[in-house]
Image (tube, grey):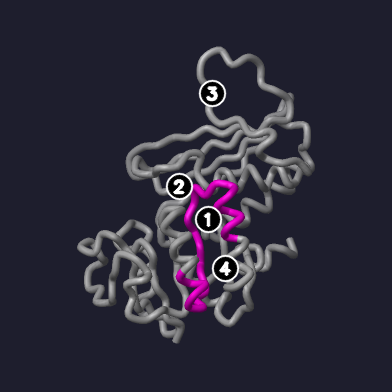
Amino acid sequence: MLKIGIVGLSGRMGHALYECAQGNDVAKVVCGIDSNTTSVPAGCNVEVVATPEDLSQAPDMFIDFSRPQCSLNVLEYSKKHGCAVILGTTGFDYAQKDKIKEYSRYIPIVLSANFSIGVNVLLNLVKKAAEIMNDADLEIVEAHHRYKVDSPSGTAIALGEAAASGRHIALKDVMVSGRDGITGERQYGTIGFSSIRGGDIVGEHNCMFCSEGERLELKHIATSRQNFARGAFRAALWLEGRSAGLYSMNEVLGLNKF
């Protein structure tokens, strides 16, 4: 039985992950990491502590949808105790991403901005479309609930990186996030991002390839966080027993053969 610790157990994704694990005969939630220990899922009787160092025993694997600094602390603990990590946290800067790569030399990590199966199919479609429609203007429009703290979303950035990869360029060199005032004409080759925040929107991403006389839209709509939780547990079962390294959902789903 795979013993799992959920980082951010009291949050929305923490609740979804805990619910997804119930009735599972191959993986069991044995602990949680959360500074708020009073809002754990109903019926949850596992050990819940504020920091991983407070755990009485290390799990086999962490599933982490928290904040960048918290995730780095979990990775440091995991390195010391040999825990694998499913990492769905977004908002890492480039230096923090380099740290994740360093940790993957010692422990197995699946890193993904989005664990939805559909989104990971979309990432591959966007890469191929960007390669073929290489002269089209690309705009990525994303919408999330009012409580989301980062913008553009990690998934939107991942979609931009997929498109940039298809065009053999670096996203940081062509990214335009948000527009206001008199901005002038759109610069050729840029990848634009627009963000919407409101209500209880789980997650919507629309990639618009705009050419003269036609427009292609590739879109994904999430209606429940359970699809992220199911994808994370699918990744967890795949990662069990793997050697140290940095993996993606492409390996988990076999999309690297796409």
- Residue type marked 2: Gly
**Which residue matches tag 2?**
203
- Of tags 4 and 3, the one toward the viewer is 4
Query: For the residue labelled by badge 1, is the local secondary structure a helix, a strand or a loop?
Result: loop
- Within 10 Å of the Cα at label 3, are there few (<14), some (14-19), or many (20+) other Cα atoms? few
Report if residue 215 is visible in the image: no
- Compared across the picture, whether 183 is left or right of 180 comes to right
Q: Which residues are magenta?
A: 77-100
The quadrant of the image that shows the N terminus is bottom left
Q: Say what amino acid the circle numbered 4 marks.
A: Ile
Residue at 54% x, 23% y is 179
**Residue at the left extreme of this rendering:** 38
Mark 2 or 1, nearer chain start = 1
Q: Residues within 10 Å of mark 1 (few under 14, many from 20)?
A: many
Q: Foreground residue, 191 or 204?
A: 191
**Relative vertical location of residue 248 with respect to residue 113 in this rendering, above or below:** below
Report the disc number at residue 109. 4
Marks 1 and 3, how far apart at CA: 25 Å
Question: What residue sits right under mark 3 in the picture?
Answer: 179
Does the magenta-highlighted stretch encompass residue 249?
no
Label 4 close to label 2 by CB (< 8 Å): no
Residue 35 x/y as whole percent? 28, 60
Residue 102 in the image, given as x and y percentages of width and height: 61, 63
Q: Amino acid at mark 3?
A: Arg
Give coordinates of residue 134: x percent, y percent. Answer: 78, 36
Instruction: Determine which residue is flagged by label 1.
Output: 114
Tell me whether the residue at label 2 lies in contact with that at label 1, contact meaning CB atoms closer than 8 angstroms.
Answer: yes
Q: Is residue 56 left or right of residue 173?
A: left
Q: Nearer the viewer, mark 4 or mark 1?
A: 4
Mark 4 or mark 2, which has the lower sequence index? 4
* Residue 73 place in picture, x, y as percent: 44, 62
**Looking at the image, is mark 1 or mark 3 earlier in the sequence?**
1
